[in-house]
Image (spheres, helix red, strand yellow):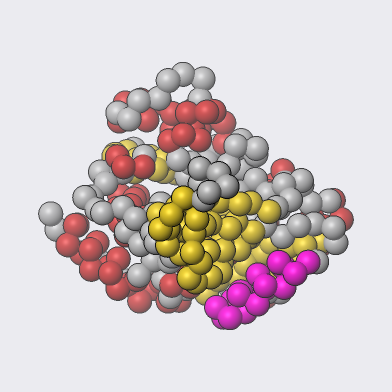
Amino acid sequence: MIDWLAFDRLQALIVGDVMTDRYLIGSVERISPEAPVPVVQLRTKDARLGGAANVALNVQAMGAKAWLCSAVGNDEAAEELLALIRQEGLPTQGIIGCPGRKTAVKTRIMAGAQHLLRIDEETTEDISTEEAGLLLSGIAEILKNHPIDVVIFQDYNKGVLTPEVIEAVTKLAMERNIPTAVDPKVKNFWAYRGVTLFKPNLKEIRNQYPSRIETTQESLNEAARYIQQKLDNQLVIITLSEKGLFCFGPNESGIIPAFPRIISDVSGAGDTVISVAALCLALDMKLKDIALLSNIAGGQVCEKPGVVTVDKAALFEEYRRRSQE
């Protein structure tokens, strides 16, 4: 039996790349006479937290306390992003400003729920050694002053999670016996040695694995063992898109199939999966329960347009129903 109220007592520290997800939403009624492209009649504008900030929102939506640590520029986009973070009730003390850095903004042009175009404004270069030092000082201060239950790395390859930052934060967590969960990207894929839970998606591990990976338990078991040999980590979760989720741990593995849904938008689903999985890890839940709850959470947010957070009540209700099937 899962103690659902236990989520409310958790505190998570999230380290990674933050960004603003901006939406320009309208309708299309004609094609431009200037070029064969649709003309969008703009109706509304929306700005939401993305990347590691969306992980923090999902952690908060589950009832836990979220501490967000990242780097932004000293620009107008940073002011907007920090205002959104404060508006959501998240602390900003772990976020450093980097002169000359461009704060990441992803602008999506939508015709109703249809995604027409995305424009990215960002810096992808690694933060400097000095900036990494400032970031790590803030992280160490939070770890010292607050009872953190889990550390989450959310990597979008935008330069915050350098190999030095990854190694230092992992070491700090190990010294305090705090579990760590990682949603990796290609650049520093193998830099997360010693983490507890490693969660790539199928495409990411296929790009890193020397042989072909099929979506069978035998093939995925081999890939998970390869990950453990490289990283010396404990648990592996591989998201399989429409085929569900694979989990691998000591003496157990399995594929949790995806449940039938009407998919609206997959944006931010990975953020939700790692958020829920990390909190379950902090509660020392069984791997199959971690996988099932995370799988349901990722599927539920795909039913809604844009980047959204998990609905805790809906998640627990569907989990109760699915676990009894």
Q: Position of residue 67 (x, y in %)?
A: 60, 70
Please determine whether, in this image, residue 299 is positioned above or below residue 210: below
Picture coordinates of residue 119 (x, y %)? 61, 52
Foreground pick, 201 / 2? 201
Examine the rendering and report whether any part of residue 163 can be seen.
yes
Most extreme residue toward the top, as rendered? Answer: 211
* Numbered range of the magenta stretch: 75-91
At horizontal 28% and vertical 69% (from top left) the residue drawn is: 314
Instruction: Name the residue: 40% across, 54% down.
Output: 114
Q: Is residue 90 magenta?
A: yes
Q: Position of residue 323 (x, y in %)?
A: 19, 57
Q: Is residue 259 left or right of residue 18?
A: left
State the predominant SS element of the stretch in magenta.
helix
x and y percentages locating residue 300 in the rendered image = 32, 59
Does 50 sit left or right of 168 as displayed? left
- Residue sticking out furthest to the left: 325
Above or below, 57 relative to 151 = below
Asked if the stretch drawn in magenta spans residue 50, the answer is no
Question: Split into 4 quadrants, where in the image is the N terminus?
Answer: bottom left
Q: Is residue 272 visible?
A: no
Query: Could you tell me which quadrant the C terminus lies in?
Result: bottom left
Q: Number of callouts in the render? A: 0
Q: Residue furthest front?
A: 33
Q: At 60% from the left edge and 75% from the top edge, which residue is drawn?
A: 84
Residue at figure coordinates x 24%, y 53% from the top left: 261
Q: Is residue 114 left or right of residue 36?
A: left
